[in-house]
Every structure is written in structure tokens, then in C-alpha cells.
Amino acid sequence: MNSLQETTTKLDRVKLPFNFNAQRMHDEYLKLQLKDFEYYNVIQLRAPAHLVDTSLPFPPPVDDYADGTWTNWLDTNDLNTSPYLKSIIDSFKDLTTVTLVRLLRLAPKSEVKEHTDPTLGLEVEKSVIRLTLPIFNNKETTFYLNAVPVDMQPGECWYLKLTDPHQVVNSGNTERVNLTIDMIPNENIRSLINESK
């Protein structure tokens, strides 16, 4: 890795000082008995309140939806029946407002094309940020950020600057599953990320 790549790596990815039990996460994931899928599958664990409880009214329209304050957020039944996953989410609720939480499944022999997420970065004034916790992967799955692989292992917790170009390639014979937690950045979160660099 050259010096430019090393500098980029230090700025665009941060491994946070948490280690979660990957086996417990995987066991609860399997208990959800999710259906087979092709290519890419998203399981909502926390979502806008009116989508979880359809008796609630739609929130009023706003000019900017990027920061997550436009609605209330509720845990879904899948999260409420997954006590270990719920305990992980609840630990972040002590730090800030947790918005969207999902399980992201990438099928074997599939890829997520390179793209950017313009509102998912600490440098964006109105934004949420996303933490990524790998649950299950294989040695032939690679997450690229700024064309440099991110060596994320199951049970780890990462902040990635997703406003930069990133892609995922799963060349293996098993699916890849990540837990992603979106949250509103505040001083607690900024300090945690900056101190972990």
C-alpha cells in the first residue's frame, strides 16, 4: 500500500472499540427463517414508525429527509424477537438517536456496484451516519472503499465514510450478511469515531 492509500485508509474507515458475539448474532439471524433470495435482500429491523405500526399517521412532509429527524423510529417484530441484536441496538440508543437498522444480505457470486451515499458521512451537515457490523461472510467477499479493501471481520463494528465510492464483491459460495445501524451524529458519536482513528 502506498502512502496515499495509507492516508486515505486512515481517513475513510475507523474500527470502533466494540466486539460483539458474531455467533450469537448469526444464530439469531438464522432464527428469523428468512426466505431465499436472488442478488440482494434487505431486512428492516428498525424503521419509520408509521411503516412499523400502520395505524400511525404519515409524518408531515419536510424539505430535507437526510438527518433522520423527520419521523419517529420503531423497532420491528424481527428485532424485538432477537434479544441479542436488540441489545446491540439499544447500546447505541444510549449514545444518540438510532434511525434505520437493517440486515443486508448479498447472495453468493453477486456484487454491489460501486456507488456513493451522499448523506452518510460525518462531514455532511445534515446527515445520519452508518455503522457496519459483519455477521457472516466468507474469505472471497471483499468490501472496497476508495478501491482499497476494508478487512472487516464478524463481530467487529466499523464507521465507513460512505460518501466516498464503495462496492462489495462476493465471489464465494455463501451469502454475506451485515448489520447496519444508522444514527444521528452528535458529540458522543463524533468523539467515539475521532478517538478510535
Image (tube, rainbow, N blue to C red):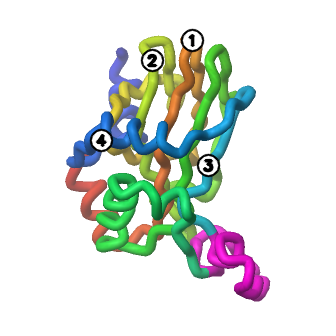
The chief SS type of the magenta part is loop
For mark 1, what is the residue? 173
Q: At x 28% / y 70%, what residue is drawn? A: 188
Q: Residues within 10 Å of mark 2 (few under 14, many from 20)?
A: some
Question: Is 97 above or below relative to 176?
Answer: below
Secondary structure at badge 1 equals loop
For mark 2, what is the residue? 138
Is residue 176 among what the camera can see?
A: yes
Mark 3 vs 1, N-terminal side: 3
Secondary structure at badge 3 equals strand
Tell me the CA gap for discs 3 and 1: 21 Å
Query: The disc labelled 2 sits on which kind of residue?
Result: Asn
- Residue 161, position as x, y percentages in the image: 48, 46
- Residue 38, position as x, y percentages in the image: 74, 27
Q: Which residues are magenta?
A: 48-71
Residue 150: image tag = none
Residue 52 as seen in the image, left or right of residue 85:
right
Question: Is 41 above or below relative to 93?
Answer: above
Tell me the CA gap for discs 3 and 4: 24 Å
Secondary structure at badge 4 equals strand
Q: Residues within 10 Å of mark 1 (few under 14, many from 20)?
A: few
60, 106: nearer the viewer? 106
Tell me the CA gap for discs 3 and 2: 20 Å
- Marks 4 and 1: CB-CB under 8 Å? no
Q: At x 42% / y 44%, what residue is drawn? A: 28
For mark 3, what is the residue? 43
Residue 15: image tag = 4
Mark 4 vs 1, N-terminal side: 4
Mark 3 vs 2, N-terminal side: 3
- Marks 4 and 2: CB-CB under 8 Å? no
